[in-house]
Image (cartoon, rainbow, N blue to C red):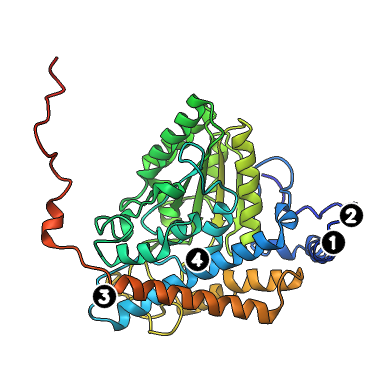
């Protein structure tokens, strides 16, 4: 194994203006002190990861911050709905705490344009953050999560099967791991067509123990597919610590065993995630094959729903009836919340001179109102009816038997 991942300081010969000079000083200090790599993560790919985020425009950086806030306030607002509104039918496997991962990865992808050109993202059963980062219509997603007939998928999908192909969000799944081989299939199609599209799949630490995890990595390597696996290691699969099923501190070691370049990054820092994803996407587009990113992160709520949470407060700290216990120490949850993705992104952009505190506060106020409006719109949409459940089950009219002739 190689030494601790280091963030390469930018070249002193570049001259990108005052904002870039501020970023340069910040990054040089971080590189010198090792502050950027506070997780003690390791790299398995050759060489140090480049700090691509330093070259992003202020507009792009602020857009990433806005995305993190959209995810955060969607999760918080939905949790409050579940806790306080008896008429609310939605549910969620909340993504709060992991916002930097989806945001950093999807910021490197092509998310709009013809379907034949955009990159595809496959999700897991914790999809709302991935969907928002990929660019789905948030009001329609809110309606979908509440089983409204005008939702993103007409109320058929709800949270666990969200899908919006128009932005390349192929969808979520309710099981552990089936999206991996499907994503590799898309990557194979890209390669067969000669396209430079990339397929990304998000999965949790629990996927390590599934056969799909290993077969997908093996096939991606053998065929040199434009495939990126983003493993969000939030320490727990459902209610068990990941160490119960994985013998390695870093699950990325499994990818290295297949000869796939792998990175372990601080999943609370959107810019670390962006840097690793940019490296992987560029490699895939150039025909360099698959990559694996393990983001060390943490979910603030329990595995499912809002047990242990209090309306108006972020996170869940109490008893979870599904786990028969409070399976995570409250001290652990609060320790991770001290390294919050929103706070880290905000502080970094202020340090870089991209935003000041007043502008950051104004953006959050705007996003909070935007999300509240999305939920209010969704609540006015018509609910699905029992008859809707019979739609799209059987084909209408006569269907020829294709197995004959």
- Residue at 71% in and 73% down: 355
Which quadrant is the N terminus positioned in?
Answer: top right
- Nearest the eye: 140 or 76: 140
369 in relation to 234, above or below: below
As measured in the structure, the alpha-carbon distance from the residue carrying label 3 to the one carrying label 4 is: 27 Å
Q: Residues within 10 Å of mark 4 (few under 14, many from 20)?
A: many
- Residue at 27% in and 75% down: 321
Q: Nearer the viewer, mark 4 or mark 2?
A: 2
Question: In the rendered view, does 169 fall on the left or right side of 319?
Answer: right
Q: Earlier in the sequence, mark 4 or mark 2?
A: 2
User: Which label sits on residue 88?
Assistant: 3
User: Which label sits on residue 298?
Assistant: 4
Question: In the rendered view, does 322 fall on the left or right side of 399?
Answer: right
Secondary structure of the residue carrying tag 3 is loop
As measured in the structure, the alpha-carbon distance from the residue carrying label 1 to the one carrying label 4 is: 36 Å
Q: Which residue is mark 1?
A: 17
Secondary structure of the residue carrying tag 1 is loop
Question: In the rendered view, does 13 fall on the left or right side of 116?
Answer: right
92 in relation to 105, above or below: below
**Which residue is situated farthest in the right direction here?**
13
Question: In the rendered view, does 193 fall on the left or right side of 27?
Answer: left
User: Which label sits on residue 12?
Assistant: 2
- Residue at 46% in and 79% down: 314
304 in relation to 317, above or below: above
Secondary structure of the residue carrying tag 4 is loop
Q: Earlier in the sequence, mark 3 or mark 4?
A: 3
Q: Earlier in the sequence, mark 1 or mark 2?
A: 2
- Nearest the eye: 175 or 110: 110
Q: Earlier in the sequence, mark 3 or mark 2?
A: 2
């Amino acid at each position: 194994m190689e030494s601790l991942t280091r963030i390469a300081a930018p070249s002193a010969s570049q001259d990108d203006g005052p904002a870039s000079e501020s970023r340069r000083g910040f990054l040089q200090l971080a590189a010198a002190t090792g502050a950027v790599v506070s997780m003690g993560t390791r790299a398995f790919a050759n060489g140090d990861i480049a700090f691509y985020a330093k070259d992003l425009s202020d507009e792009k950086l602020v857009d990433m911050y806005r995305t993190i806030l959209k995810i955060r306030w969607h999760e918080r607002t939905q949790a409050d709905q579940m806790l306080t509104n008896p008429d609310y039918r939605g549910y969620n496997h909340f993504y709060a705490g992991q916002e930097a991962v989806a945001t950093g990865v999807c910021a490197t992808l092509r998310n709009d344009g013809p379907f034949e050109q955009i990159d595809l993202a496959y999700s897991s059963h914790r999809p709302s953050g991935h969907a928002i980062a990929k660019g789905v219509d948030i009001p329609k997603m809110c309606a979908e999560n509440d089983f409204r007939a005008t939702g993103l998928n007409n109320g058929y999908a709800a949270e666990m099967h969200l899908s919006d192909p128009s932005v390349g969000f192929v969808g979520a799944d309710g099981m552990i791991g089936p999206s991996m081989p499907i994503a590799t299939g898309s990557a194979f199609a890209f390669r067969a067509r000669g396209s430079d599209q990339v397929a990304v799949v998000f999965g949790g630490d629990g996927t390590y123990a599934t056969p799909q995890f290993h077969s997908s990595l093996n096939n991606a390597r053998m065929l040199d597919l434009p495939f990126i696996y983003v493993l969000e290691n939030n320490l727990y699969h459902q209610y068990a610590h990941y160490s119960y099923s994985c013998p390695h501190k870093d699950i990325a070691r499994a990818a290295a065993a297949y000869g796939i370049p792998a990175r372990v990054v601080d999943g609370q820092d959107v810019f670390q995630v962006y840097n690793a994803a940019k490296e992987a996407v560029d490699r895939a587009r150039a025909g360099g094959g698959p990559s694996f990113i393990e983001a060390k992160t943490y979910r603030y709520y329990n595995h499912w729903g809002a047990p242990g949470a209090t309306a108006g407060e972020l996170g869940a700290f109490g008893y979870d009836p599904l786990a028969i216990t409070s399976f995570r120490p409250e001290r652990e949850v609060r320790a991770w919340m001290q390294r919050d993705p929103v706070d880290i992104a905000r502080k970094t952009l202020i340090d870089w001179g991209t935003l000041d505190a007043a502008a950051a506060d104004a953006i959050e106020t705007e996003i909070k109102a935007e999300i509240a409006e999305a939920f209010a719109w969704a609540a006015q949409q018509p609910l699905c009816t029992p008859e809707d459940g019979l739609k799209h089950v059987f084909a209408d009219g006569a269907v020829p038997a294709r197995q004959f002739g």
